[in-house]
Image (tube, rainbow, N blue to C red):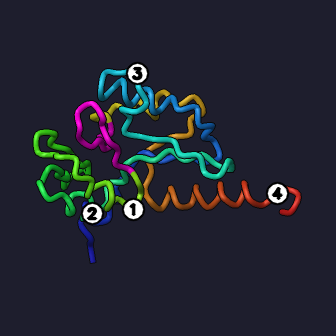
Amino acid sequence: MVVPEQVTKEKKFVGADLEKCTACRVCELVCALENEKAFDPKLSRIKVLGLNQIMNMPVACRFCDDAPCVRSCPRDALTQSEETGIIMVDDAKCDLCGWCIESCKHGALFLNPEKKTVMICNLCGGTLQCIEWCPENALSLMTQKEFDKSARKATVSKLIPDSWR
């Protein structure tokens, strides 16, 4: 049986090699500059989270199939491209109710305090500034499966000393 390419093709999102991320937050700055024309990390569509001083994890939209954020929006302010999975925000419709933020299991929707709307990674229209400018080359486009494998590897290496292996 032949399965159409669009069904087998996994969506890719900005993910990180958690062993390489140093939490320099350059990704946040270049994202805000590219998308909001401001050198302000509060306006970034990617955020770096520190996980218990053990590991740093950049978080961006994972373009979920049947995205909960899109489904939960009572004003239809969010739409998802069938082709790319990218979620677009109609600022004029968004009333910042927060339902989309609450429904995102990855914590990848962020407030834009100036526009009073939400921000979601848009892959910079194809020129991914966060990936291009990451000084540690920690960021790349990856599938969920690739991210999970990288995260497991990083977790094991951070929690189990080399001398025990």
Q: Residues within 10 Å of mark 1 (few under 14, many from 20)?
A: few
**17 left or right, relative to 40:** right
Residue that mark 1 sits on: 105
Pointers 3 and 4 in contact (C-beta within 8 Å): no
Distance from the alpha carbon under mark 3 to that under mark 4: 38 Å
Tell me where residue 143 appears, x and y as whole percent: 43, 56
Q: Where is residue 6, by image quadrant?
A: bottom left
Pointers 1 and 2 in contact (C-beta within 8 Å): yes
Q: Secondary structure at mark 4?
A: loop
The earlier-in-sequence mark between 3 and 4 is: 3
Q: Is residue 96 magenta?
A: no
> For the residue marked with disc 1, what is the amino acid?
Lys
> For the residue marked with disc 2, what is the amino acid?
Pro
Tell me where residue 115 appears, x and y as whole percent: 23, 33
Q: Is residue 109 above or below residue 130?
A: below
Residue depicted at 68% across the width and 47% down the height: 53
Residue depicted at 27% across the width and 30% down the height: 114
Distance from the alpha carbon under mark 1 to that under mark 2: 8 Å
Q: Is residue 78 above or below residue 9?
A: above
Q: Which mark is residue 68?
A: 2
Specify the segment rendered in magenta: 108-123
**76 left or right, relative to 100:** left
The earlier-in-sequence mark between 4 and 1 is: 1
